[in-house]
Amino acid sequence: SKIEGKALLPSEFFYPHGFQGVLAIFGLPDAKLTVGVQVVGTQHGESSPEQDPGLATDGAPNASANIAAPQRLAVSILQAHGLKHMNNFTGDNPYVTCEVKHLDPAAEVTRVETKA
């Protein structure tokens, strides 16, 4: 089955306070995807930027202050509207794939699909 559209949610829209809203699906006119994203903490138990402001005891910024710890996300695909049935003969069911783009290009791709 081929990709018919794509919705993007850059991290500045959900980090650090989360996001719940409607995204346009590019490639499908009038199609919308309702999603929720929660930042649920750091991986490996590291402190989050809110917990570690990166200040040393002398008030000078910590060298690691500009490096964000990897975050765990909870992504919910709540609803989709306007998806097309592309193959009426075989009962094609539209579905959504969610893929997380990591800052580290060597990181393993994180991908999930909704059930058709």
Image: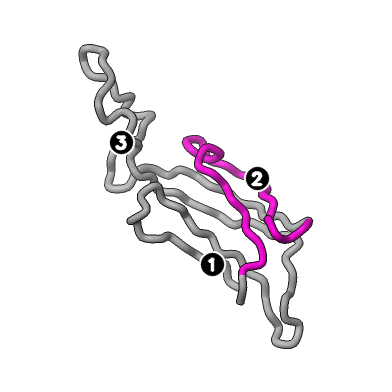
| Residue on which disc 3 sits | 47
Q: Is residue 58 above or below residue 18?
A: above
| Residue on which disc 1 sits | 113
Q: Is residue 86 above or below residue 66?
A: below
Q: Residue at x 50, y 42 (%)?
A: 11
Across and down, in percent, residue 89 comes to 74, 87
Q: Is residue 17 left or right of residue 32?
A: left
Residue 28 colored in magenta in the image: yes
Label 3 environment density (alpha carbons within 10 Å; few <14, some 14–19, many ≥20):
some
Q: CA distance from mark 3 to mark 1?
A: 30 Å
Q: CA distance from mark 1 to mark 2?
A: 19 Å
Q: Is residue 51 above or below residue 11?
A: above
Task: Identify the secondary structure beneath mark 2.
Answer: strand
| Residue on which disc 2 sits | 21
Label 2 environment density (alpha carbons within 10 Å; few <14, some 14–19, many ≥20):
few
Q: Earlier in the sequence, mark 1 or mark 2?
A: 2
Q: Is residue 103 left or right of residue 76?
A: left
Task: Identify the secondary structure beneath mark 3.
Answer: loop
Q: Quadrant of residue 114?
A: bottom right
Q: Residue at x 33, y 40 (%)?
A: 69
- Kind of residue at disc 2: Gly
- Kind of residue at disc 1: Glu
